[in-house]
Amino acid sequence: MAKHWADFQYEIYLNGMTGAVPRLPTDLTRLEELTERRLGPGPVGYVTGSAGDGSTARANRAALRRRRIVPRMLRDVHERDLSVEVLGRGLPAPLALAPVGVLSIMHPDAERAAARAAAAQGVPYVLSSASSTPIEQVAEAMGDAERWFQLYWAKDREVTRSFLTRAKAAGFSVLVVTLDTPLLAWRPRDLDQAYLPFLHGVGTANYFSDPAFRSGLAKPVHEDPNAAVMHFVGMFADPAKTWPDLTFVRENWDGPIVLKGVLHPDDARQAVDAGMDGVVVSNHGGRQVAGSVAAADALPGVVAAVGDRLTVLFDSGVRTGDDVFKALALGARAVLVGRPYVYGLALDGQAGVEHVIRCLLAELDLTLALSGHATPATVGPADLMEDMAAE
Ligand SMILES: Cc1cc2nc3c(=O)[nH]c(=O)nc-3n(C[C@H](O)[C@H](O)[C@H](O)COP(=O)(O)O)c2cc1C
Ligand SMILES: CCCCC(=O)C(=O)O
């Protein structure tokens, strides 16, 4: 029998018999406000902030809330199974932790804590290129748990080649190539405080640990750390790249490759032509193009264009189990979640990240059951209706 994630509900109530209540709220939409009070203004602005006036991040939430579930009754949901197959791997649930850089500004245990939490709960951890912990050390913290690597596709080919070699050797299976960040967007919350996390003593240790990166520096990192950070800022991504350049990535990675940040159906079709295995429909949590289409509004078009040829994943704005349900209903195979687990990390380290995963999946399990589904496979557009007046 598959694990019933909803059992977490009665575990919480039973623990309550000894006076214990969860350390963090079980309504994950409340974590942002708590994090605002916990972290310093620089880090909190960086994690909660978005591009421009924040309209894309708000649109992401609105597009999910606007879709309402139409539950079905009497459909035997006694035995449920949330497991899904994604890119040839069996996952216990349709969820992965999104790549998030510089986690050391959120919690001293940083990427190791997030990776351990993912491993403990069995969901894939997607490690950011811009992590504050080197690739190998994250792998070591994870044992043989499922791990994916997110590539910032550098100007310097040798850095990209080196990252891919290191990630492969460290047991990362799926490559996630982020396309939506060829430049860092206009982010007023960071600009108004003149706060660029990489310049505040946390650097991007993953780059600093890389021999190919270091060989591009005029002076060793410890002699001029700010110059090293500015070198990173100038080379971590490459606005000159075009679709044919993907050949290089394909030739240097023999596992599945997923393109993250696809919103237009024609770009999804180009991903097929480029021999890719999947896409993440995402607007980077509203952090890149202000005024962009909401990710959930872009999802059906991408699914219609390539859903039979590529694995379509989704992120941007997922905060609750019913949000995950809605993304599945719109055609996503699985979702990535970003800020909520970072808030969990900031508030309670590894335990906080595990709390977020368990709440999301318990709520998803119950949403499925209460809507008449025993598995994600049966969920589809007929489970949703649109309510333009929804709050
Ligand atoms: C603080 C922060 C740092 C991020 N760093 C990266 C990164 O290094 N690479 C990447 O592909 N996406 C990065 N993202 C975007 C996430 O992977 C993901 O697309 C986004 O957070 C999803 O939206 P959500 O936060 O609403 O769940 C970052 C997001 C945040 C909030
Ligand atoms: C250099 C880019 C860093 C991380 C990122 O993707 C984000 O802040 O959204």
Image: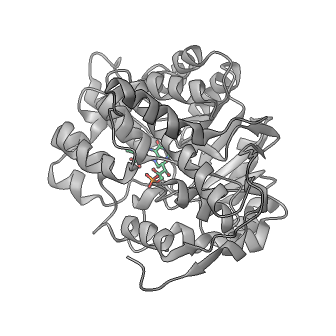
Camera-side residue: 206 or 18?
18
Residue at 44 percent across and 36 percent down: it is: 13
Q: Give the mark count.
A: 0
Residue at 69 percent across and 52 percent down: it is: 245
Q: Quadrant of residue 106?
A: top left
Residue at 70 percent across and 68 percent down: it is: 73
Q: Is residue 97 left or right of residue 334?
A: left
**Residue 259 visible within the image:** yes
Q: Is residue 264 above or below residue 32?
A: below
**Residue 204 visible within the image:** no
Residue 122, position in %: x, y?
A: 64, 30
Q: Is residue 101 left or right of residue 245?
A: left
Q: Is residue 391 above or below residue 226?
A: below
Camera-side residue: 160 or 329?
329
Camera-side residue: 83 or 71?
71
Residue farthest along the front direction in this orientation: 17
Q: Quadrant of the C terminus?
A: bottom left
Residue at 57 percent across and 54 percent down: it is: 179
Residue 82, position in %: x, y?
A: 71, 45
Camera-side residue: 231 or 378?
378
Q: Is residue 245 left or right of residue 377?
A: left
Residue 30, position in %: x, y?
A: 31, 51
Residue 283, position in %: x, y?
A: 50, 62
